[in-house]
Image: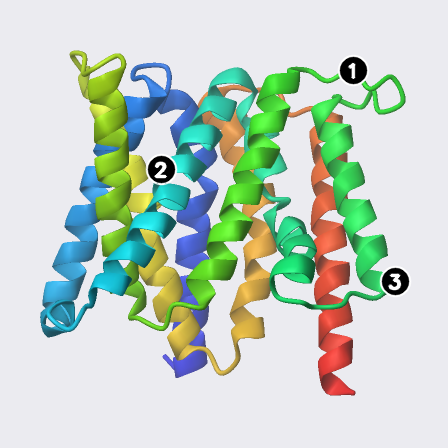
Amino acid sequence: MKQQGRAYFFAIFAILLWSTVGSALKIGLRYISFPELLFWASVVSIIIFSITILAQGKLYQMRLLRVSDFVRAAILGFLNPFLYYFVLLKAYNLLLAQEAGTLNYIWPVVLVLLSIPLLKQKIGWVSILAIFISFSGTMVIGTRGKVFELSFSNPLGVGLALLSALFWAIFWIYNMKDRKDDTIKLLLNFVFGFLYILIYLIGTSGFSMISIKGLTGAVYIGLFEMGVTYMLWLKALKLSATTAKISNLVFISPFISLFFIRYAVGEMIMISTVIGLALIVGGIILQKWSEFSKSVK
């Protein structure tokens, strides 16, 4: 298999796994509280990243870390996995899986908006139009098609799903400035995220008896949302001739996700979800087309 073909294989495999996550989250939350799900999923992810670092012979890089690296990891770990997943899982608790998962896909648009004040970037009218299109998609999903009535299905759940996108976009911007190895960054972030959720659990509800189904759900999320799948995606990016050839495939994920939500979770997919998702993805694609047009001039 040629190198680009291998890149596509790893990318598609990662996308298929990510597409199951919305369903896995919704099913898992039937058997375990969302703080405990995040706790055990983080444990699994830490194990995965540690094994990967050992297998790749990168353990020596851990000894080169400075105090500033740990401070940065403590801050970024608070954003992700702690704050991002804490808010996202609560949104999944309050909304249908198709709503929470689809609304979260607005994060690339939020990233563009944040890049204006944080990265001092300017955006043109095409980008403004793209943002408007994507945000109109969130309104369609959040109101279940009753846009002009502004009747949100669950205002708190919709707000949390959009807030999770904001946290992820902020994390993404500051994570890009960190030049450390990706796997080491992830391990450090998740170690601190694990500590934050541990403190939260000790200070609030504590731990409860977990059923096998609940623990299985947490392990699945730790493996395929936070752990192995990210490794597959990084592998695809490294093998690909250009990032664009791989990154554009990610837009397939939310549509495949609806298939799993329908047949694994049992939710009837609403037409408002499909229309809203099409608007969100359409706006993101328009934004990327605008960026590509500028780069080739």
* Residue 236 appearing in the image: yes
The numbered mark, 1 or 3, whose residue comes first in the sequence reads 3
Please give the name of the residue rendered at 77% of the width and 44% of the height, measured from the top-left corner. 279
Q: Nearer the viewer, residue 237 or 154?
A: 154
Q: Nearer the viewer, residue 20 or 205?
A: 205
> Can you identify the residue that label 1 sits on?
151
The chosen color scheme is rainbow
Percent x, y for residue 248?
A: 60, 64
Q: Secondary structure at mark 3?
A: helix
**Crowding at label 3, few (<14), some or many (≥20) Cα neighbours within 10 Å?**
few
Which label sits on residue 125?
Answer: 3
Position of 3 with respect to 269 (left or right) is left
The numbered mark, 3 or 2, whose residue comes first in the sequence reads 2
Position of 237 with respect to 112 (left or right) is left
> Can you identify the residue that label 2 sits on?
82
Please give the name of the residue rendered at 83% of the width and 56% of the height, measured from the top-left corner. 128
Percent x, y for residue 253?
A: 54, 48
Please give the name of the residue rendered at 26% of the width and 12% of the height, measured from the top-left corner. 205
